[in-house]
């Protein structure tokens, strides 16, 4: 008897690719309905002002314009609710779907125009007159707090976390390292801009919204609530999604507006964002300034860390509320023993685009800060960056390691890990001693070259639950209906691999359904590197359950025991290889509708993958440009369902991390005018900037919290990139602690070279 | 701006008679008036290259060209790459080398690479990298795109 083919652990081709390669994708802009109206948003041209009046008369006279909505038309719709980390004191800062009395950032929706054609809608939007009394904007998050407007202050809340006796540790310290560090404002910027198309079917009393992503079920529930509908009369439908990275798929004003308008006008309403809008209206992220101190002993062991940071959240608290600063605060200790820890994260409002999560939210920031501290300790003690990390790493024997901190409603307990082993393996892959020797030689010859190391702990697999239904249809096709979403990462392939192994079928015969609220009642969606862990295990559970059912039903028909049967490549056979067999299709036809099973995976703890990045850079002292000569990533994934998909996640994350480290920044002038409004101003890495990389995936620390040992892959490529690039540049300059601010743009580096006399 | 011009666009060998304003971009005309939505629009200012199509043998940004300028020219889009069920070698190489994730930038990269390699099959590796750096991808980190295009280039040269 042939052994059943196994798919988990193999880099099988993606099931998603063919339609995308043929130009048959269904992205938001590709969805159209007969008679649809096009919506264009009129956005505030000033950063802060009192909205005195809106005159849409001229816009309404334009042929093809159907209607203009302002705050009065949507006064009954509440502001956008919090999805995660929704502290009560933040609620007054939620964003209305159209500006009320004030405008608070350039790009804030003030009115919407509905027209027969998008060109006409854009013409009309320019004719809408806004009477705004300009007010002074708040453009800096640090410093003293003050009024943000008449009723509210610039600092709605402070995230405080701590354990251990921090003051005692500082009093007893051999030395104290103090740093001031900042991370620039940048974001996910997917290649597909946002889009939403709503359609009301009066005959069935169903409102549907296309262009959903990430968290369709939560958004269905809450958009329905905002516009006064039942969740059962509303569907959110995900098509192809052109990149998510955390920012796409949250509830934004435009989603609510198309739904409300489709319902009100009983016309399909389509909104497709343009790139300028995207760069000023979709979530920004990352901008923080940290003042951090570390108490150390004579050998460089960390005794305590005390951090105070300012989180620049922009003009409103959107769906993520306090999530990003909370994660930054909770994940800062990373892979090191920090006996005492205290952090105060000051959430600040400014007159800039509001913020949300972006791939490795809070961790890109706090990894930069923590790893800069480790490098500073190394310099202080006079040892190298590798040795200081070795001395402080949490030992494998300490696992599971309770950090005594909480985030996202969970206790942080590192479930498994051998951090020192991964450091060794990654340095070996990087050829670290030879690299050091060659860099030293080149520096002696006058080149500005250097290398750095950064380590981090990621989090993934956020619960609390995922449900999956698996069915073998009458035509023999297998369908896996999930409550997650696909943002391009290969969900269909990975879930099909897991289901295929349990069911004994070819993964390519499995259709994985995601992002359709009309197919399954509940779903947590795709964020926090949760899909493979949570939905993967739910898929396995449901598939195993279905396998049991299949064998029971087949045993009846085949007049044998279920235990005597196996499923191999879609065929139910006797294990002893005797007698007749039957195909799953035949069984499905014999028992129509019976071959279905549903199961749920519950998890109250996240799982914690971890990694090491090594970078070697060369600085061009004429231009201030940084070229990456070598980049090695070690990442322990617990168990890789599809190693190539894992590598791809990491490679893409690295590219984005490099953007934030070297190029990407949303810049504003003093009046709050955004200066990064095209791809000529907001520079993302191209194939010239992203280096060849070597990615080492290890499975040394499977998670004990799920049977396959899975951990998430989505964010480890991005997490410590700012940190490792800073370390490598410092090394190239032979000046520890030089890089204190990201991104290290050519202009910034040139000015550093000038100031330090290196140029 | 509402005066419309009647014109015919030739896309993948099919004639599309359309009626558009002078200001209508070729990208919008291909997608909205001719129904070929495989060509994607990522920035509308000529930088990301998601809308790249081949016009008279040259890869162009269809967001920077007006539909009226394309009359009488031979336009090729991603929908015209495959031969029936058989993928073009470039499409197959993207699949084999995992050169795509979300797939939004993919049609632009395919048309850019095919357009350049058809014109200049022996392009140097460094020049090829330069060409590919004219389009943006936000998912892959580019390395697999580069591998895919190099592999396809070899096959296209071999033909």
Image (tube, rainbow, N blue to C red):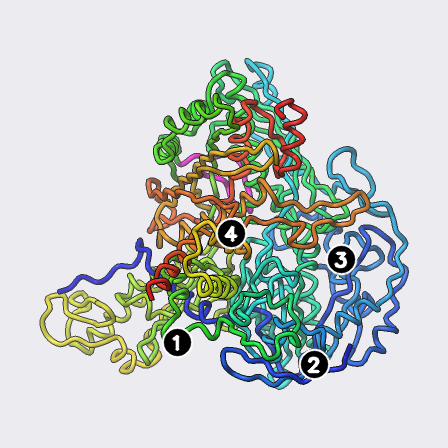
Return the mark for residue A108: 3
Same chain, labels 4 and 1: yes
Q: Secondary structure at mark 2?
A: loop
Q: Are marks 4 and 3 on the same chain?
A: no
Residue A312 x/y as whole percent: 70, 42
Kindly report which numbered mark, 4 or 1, lies closer to the viewer in this rendering.
4
Residue A277 percent across, percent down from the top left: 70, 59
Same chain for labels 2 and 3? Say yes or no.
Answer: yes
- N-terminal of the two: label 4 or label 1? 1
Looking at the rendered structure, the secondary structure element under dot 3 is loop
Tag 4's secondary structure? Answer: helix
Tell me the CA gap for discs 1 and 3: 47 Å
Q: Are marks 4 and 1 in contact (CB under 8 Å)?
A: no
Which residue has dot 4 on it?
B130
Q: Is residue A198 magenta?
A: no
**Residue on which the image places disc 1:** B83
Along the line of sight, the residue nearer the viewer: A264 or A653: A653
């Amino acid at each position: 008897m042939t052994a059943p083919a196994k798919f988990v652990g193999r880099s099988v081709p993606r099931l998603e690719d063919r339609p995308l390669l043929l130009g048959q994708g269904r992205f938001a802009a590709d969805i159209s309905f007969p008679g649809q109206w096009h919506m264009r948003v009129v956005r505030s041209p000033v950063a802060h002002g009192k909205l005195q009046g809106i005159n849409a008369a001229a816009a309404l006279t334009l042929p093809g314009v159907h209607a203009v909505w302002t705050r009065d038309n949507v006064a009954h719709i509440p502001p956008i609710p919090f999805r995660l980390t929704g502290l009560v004191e933040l609620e007054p800062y939620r964003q209305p779907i159209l500006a009320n009395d004030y405008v608070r950032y350039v790009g804030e929706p003030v009115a919407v125009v509905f027209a027969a054609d998008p060109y006409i809608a854009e013409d009309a939007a320019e004719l809408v007159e806004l009477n705004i009394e300009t007010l002074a904007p708040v453009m800096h998050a640090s410093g003293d707090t003050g009024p943000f407007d008449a009723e509210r202050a610039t600092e709605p809340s402070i995230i405080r976390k701590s354990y251990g006796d921090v003051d005692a540790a500082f009093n007893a310290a051999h030395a104290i390292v103090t740093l001031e560090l900042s991370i620039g404002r940048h974001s996910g910027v997917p290649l597909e801009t946002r889009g939403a198309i709503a359609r009301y079917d009066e005959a069935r009393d169903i409102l549907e919204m296309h262009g959903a992503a990430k968290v369709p079920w939560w958004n269905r529930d809450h958009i329905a609530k905002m516009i006064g509908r039942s969740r059962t009369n509303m569907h959110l439908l995900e098509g192809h999604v052109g990149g998510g990275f955390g920012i796409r798929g949250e509830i934004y004003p435009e989603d609510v507006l198309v739904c409300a308008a489709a319902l009100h006008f009983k016309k399909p309403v389509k909104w497709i964002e343009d790139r300028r809008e995207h760069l000023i209206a979709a979530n920004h992220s990352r901008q923080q300034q940290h003042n951090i101190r570390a108490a150390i002993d004579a050998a460089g062991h960390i005794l305590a860390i005390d951090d105070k940071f300012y989180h620049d959240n922009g003009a409103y608290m959107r769906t993520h509320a306090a999530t990003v600063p909370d994660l930054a605060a909770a994940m800062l200790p990373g892979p090191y023993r920090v006996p005492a820890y205290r952090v105060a994260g000051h959430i600040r409002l400014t007159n800039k685009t509001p913020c949300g999560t972006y791939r490795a939210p809070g961790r890109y920031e706090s990894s930069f800060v923590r790893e800069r501290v480790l490098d500073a300790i190394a310099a202080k003690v006079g040892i190298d960056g590798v040795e200081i990390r070795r001395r402080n790493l949490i030992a494998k024997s300490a696992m599971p390691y309770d950090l005594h901190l909480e985030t996202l409603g969970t206790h942080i307990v590192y479930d498994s890990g051998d951090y020192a082993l991964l450091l060794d393996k990654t340095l070996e892959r990087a050829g670290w001693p030879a690299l050091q020797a060659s860099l030293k030689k080149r520096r002696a010859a006058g080149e500005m070259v250097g290398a750095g190391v950064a380590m981090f702990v990621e989090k993934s697999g956020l619960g609390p639950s995922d449900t999956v239904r698996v069915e073998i249809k009458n035509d023999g096709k297998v369908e896996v209906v999930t409550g997650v979403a696909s943002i391009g990462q290969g969900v269909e392939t990975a879930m099909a691999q897991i289901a295929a192994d349990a069911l004994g079928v070819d993964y390519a015969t499995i259709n994985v359904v995601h992002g359709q609220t009309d197919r399954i009642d509940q779903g947590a969606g795709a964020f926090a590197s949760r899909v493979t862990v949570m939905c993967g295990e739910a898929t396995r559970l449901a598939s195993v359950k279905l396998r049991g059912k299949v064998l029971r039903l087949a045993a009846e028909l085949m007049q044998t025991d279920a235990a005597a049967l196996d499923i191999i490549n879609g065929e139910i056979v006797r294990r002893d290889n005797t007698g007749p067999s039957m195909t799953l299709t035949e069984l499905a036809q014999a028992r129509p509708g019976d071959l279905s099973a549903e199961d749920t995976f519950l998890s109250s703890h996240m799982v914690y993958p971890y990694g090491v990045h090594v970078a070697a850079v060369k600085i061009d002292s004429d231009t201030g440009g940084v070229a990456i000569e070598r980049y090695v990533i070690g990442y322990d994934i617990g168990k890789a369902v599809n190693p190539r998909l894992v590598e791809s996640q990491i490679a893409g994350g690295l590219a984005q991390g490099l953007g934030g480290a070297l190029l990407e920044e949303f810049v504003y002038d003093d009046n709050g005018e955004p200066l990064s409004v095209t791809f000529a101003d907001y520079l993302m890495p191209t194939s010239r900037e992203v280096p060849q990389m070597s990615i080492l995936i290890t499975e040394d620390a499977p998670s004990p919290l799920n049977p396959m040992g899975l951990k998430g892959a989505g964010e480890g490529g991005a997490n410590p990139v700012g940190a490792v690039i800073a370390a490598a540049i410092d090394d190239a300059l032979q000046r520890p602690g030089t890089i204190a601010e990201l991104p290290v743009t050519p202009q910034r580096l040139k000015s550093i070279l000038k100031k330090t006399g290196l140029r | 701006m509402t005066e419309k011009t009647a014109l015919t666009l030739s896309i993948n060998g099919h004639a599309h008679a359309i009626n558009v304003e002078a200001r209508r971009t070729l990208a919008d005309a291909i997608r909205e008036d001719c129904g070929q939505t495989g060509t994607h629009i990522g920035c509308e200012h000529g930088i990301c290259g998601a809308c790249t199509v081949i016009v008279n043998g040259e890869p162009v940004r269809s967001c920077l060209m007006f539909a009226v300028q394309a009359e009488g020219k031979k336009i090729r889009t991603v929908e015209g790459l495959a031969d029936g069920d058989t993928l073009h070698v470039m499409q197959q190489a993207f699949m084999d080398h995992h050169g795509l994730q979300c797939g939004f930038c993919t049609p632009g990269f395919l048309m850019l690479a095919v357009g350049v390699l058809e014109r200049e099959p022996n392009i140097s590796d460094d020049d090829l990298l330069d060409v590919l750096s004219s389009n943006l991808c936000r998912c892959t980190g580019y390395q697999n795109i580069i591998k895919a295009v190099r592999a396809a280039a070899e096959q296209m040269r071999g033909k």
